[in-house]
Amino acid sequence: MKELVNNLKGDRVIWSFVALLALFSFMPVFSASSNLAYLNHGTGNTISYLLKHLAHIFIGFVIIYWVHKVPYHYYRGISKIALPIVWILLGYTMVKGTVIAGANASRWIQVPFIGITFQTSTLAAIVLLLFVARYLSKKREEEITFQTSLIELWVPVFITLIFILPSNFSTAALIFSMILMLTFVGKYPLKYLGFIIGAGIAALALFVLLAKAFPDSHLFSRVNTWESRIENFSTNKPGEDDYQIEKAKIAIASGGVYGLGPGKSIQKNFLPQSSSDFIYAIIVEEYGLVGGFGVLSMYLLLFFRFVIAAHKATTLFGKLLVVGLGFPMIFQAMINMAVAVELLPVTGQTLPLISSGGSSIWMTCIALGIILNVTKKEEEIAEEIKDKARRDSALKKLIDKQLEEEGKEENKEENVEENYSIKDNTGNPMNAVLNK
């Protein structure tokens, strides 16, 4: 165990916060999954959901470990190659992601032969932010013109967002906001950002108008849901989401200061998505305001650690990676908590590292692995370079030794062939045998 801890490189404080959030997640998920257990099995036994969450967290930490071993400058090239692959996956999701387990699953695809559902927009967000960070770091010494940046930067961004928007407006809006923030930090000209924001608003308005013109199209099936959520939030008009919000508010009010106690939540039996989208309400009900503020404080401390990591990064690309991958994680957590207390309309964003769900946890872990790689100290990087040089040297010696042994075998075969030749070079045909 000690050896494993010593192999963990990067910011130890970030490692600690991630581990604490992951460990804390087991109790809320174990408790809040009872609703799903009753619906799917009729028994209320949540052990299977706990084990499933354990597997997701374990795989997530394996992902963090392996990703944080890869030097972060490799992701420059990876982002450029991965973006077209992401477009293919998003297009496939739009066509094939229809209904899974009786629910609208146009955001997910099912991995063949494995049966795991995967939300492609989460992977797209990481790849797109890597792509933007790569572009900004590449152009840091050049004067950026609107025409070139429109083709090289914003066209790929809008293509990706167009794929995500029809099924997941909140994710598309979050990604676009984070890209604007990243370009601002990367010193993209402000005069061009105004045009980009205007183009984004115009594109959204055009999409809504097309939805009104073709209301029966599968592509625009979610537009009515967006409108009803915004209308229900801004007015007192009752809607489908009011039931979820009402139960979430009852759960938060029931928690009081210290909560009802672990596993003693009542609203988990009535609140849909209690283990994912509305898990924060269950946390407050069981652990009270103390638990609610504790979770909020953990995310805020993690945010401040990301700020410190971005400040300490030695390259512009590293700084942009920490900002582009770390800040969206925190903002997503804030959105999830704001929805639970009805500060924002229902969005469907999960609570990172706490909510149940495989793909959301794993994509968060990929982002954390990249951030931890950026936070490696110079001595850690030097040690890794030395280890790589030693491995290369050992491999070279092994290859040289193998080649030397093969050479000796070949010489031995040639000598044997020469010594035991029965070719008669004399007049006596028995001399070749007698001499041996």
Image: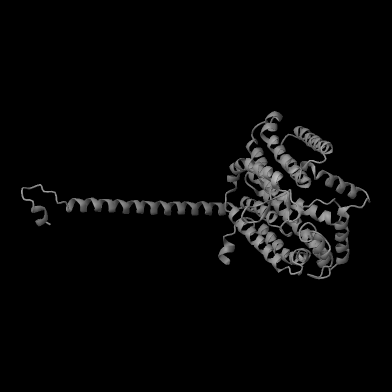
Q: Residue 22's spot in the image, x, y percent?
A: 70, 62
Q: How many marks?
A: 0
Determine whether, in the image, residue 384 is placed left or right of residue 175. left
The answer to whether residue 130 shows anywhere in this view is no
Q: Residue 291's spot in the image, x, y percent?
A: 80, 64
At x 60% / y 41%, what residue is drawn? Answer: 81
At x 57% / y 63%, what residue is drawn? Answer: 4
Quadrant in the picture for residue 155 = top right
Q: Is residue 167 above or below residue 51?
A: above
Determine whether, in the image, residue 20 is placed left or right of residue 81. right
At x 64% / y 58%, what residue is drawn? Answer: 60
Q: Residue 216's spot in the image, x, y percent?
A: 81, 41
* Colouring chosen for the image of the structure: one colour
Q: Residue furthest left?
A: 427
Q: Residue 386's spot in the image, x, y percent?
A: 49, 53
Say which quadrant the N terminus sits in. bottom right
Say which quadrant the C terminus sits in. bottom left
The answer to whether residue 373 shows anywhere in this view is yes
In the foreground, 174 or 92: 92
In the foreground, 296 or 377: 296
Q: Is residue 310 above or below residue 52?
A: above
